[in-house]
Amino acid sequence: MESYSFELITGPMSCGKTEELLRRVKRCIIAKKKVKVISPDVDTRAKGDYIESRNGLWLDAIKVKHAIQIMSVVKPEDEVIAIDELQFFDSNIVKVISKLMQEGKRIIGTGLELDFKAEPFGCMPQLMCIATEISKLHAVCMKCGCDHATRTQRLINGKPADKNSPLIMIGGDETYEARCIKCYELPDHEHEKQKHSLKLLSFKH
Ligand SMILES: [Zn+2]
């Protein structure tokens, strides 16, 4: 059997995942390997059919909406399959990557491990289990400047987003920044309100 691998590069936003993916892909290109670069159709950061890291590196990428479509995009002669933003794919991505591994491909993927609520993002837990190698990158905390940011802080109009805020925001000034576990904030106003009304009730009795 041909050698296969699934290298998974993960971490919070701004930790250099895509930059690391592109670095590995460029080495494959120098080695004259047949490379295919794929990214999910939902990624709004990239403007066209390419992936771009925050430091301006970029590569042509094929945009795919459903994980299963990857099977028709990848040709038998392709040796290296690079997939960006794995957290956005549907659950079939786990089977698709397993199949590519069985076919002897080298797969290099990136994905956010946690969403803004610090909960596992999409199929990342399953993908981390089937990966043959995991690189966990840390970002610089944008609040205290330490080197160990592992979380993605969502800000709405500059303030930490509430736990109950919708996953997709329409309007409002929504931004994200990397933060360490000490600086990460997730207010839960619903829970606070409930606690407050319970206190009032017990006070009355
Ligand atoms: Zn911090």
Image: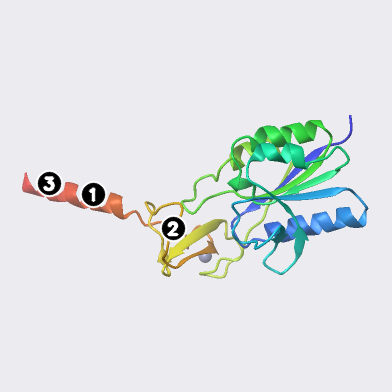
Q: Which residue is mark 3?
A: 201
Q: Observer-nearest residue: 13 or 82?
A: 82
Disc with the residue nearer the chain's start (3 vs 2) = 2
Q: Residue at x 68, y 32 (%)?
A: 95
Q: Residue at x 46, y 54 (%)?
A: 168
x and y, in percent, of residue 113 in the image:
59, 48
Amino acid at pointer 3: Leu
Q: Which residue is mark 1?
A: 195
Q: Is mark 2 within 8 Å of ligand 1?
A: no
* Residue 118 marker: none
Q: Observer-nearest residue: 19 or 74?
A: 74
Q: Secondary structure at mark 2?
A: loop
Q: Distance between the Cα atoms at labels 3 and 2?
A: 35 Å
Disc with the residue nearer the chain's start (3 vs 1) = 1
The image shows residue 120, relative to residue 145, as above or below, that is: above
Q: How many tags in the picture?
A: 3
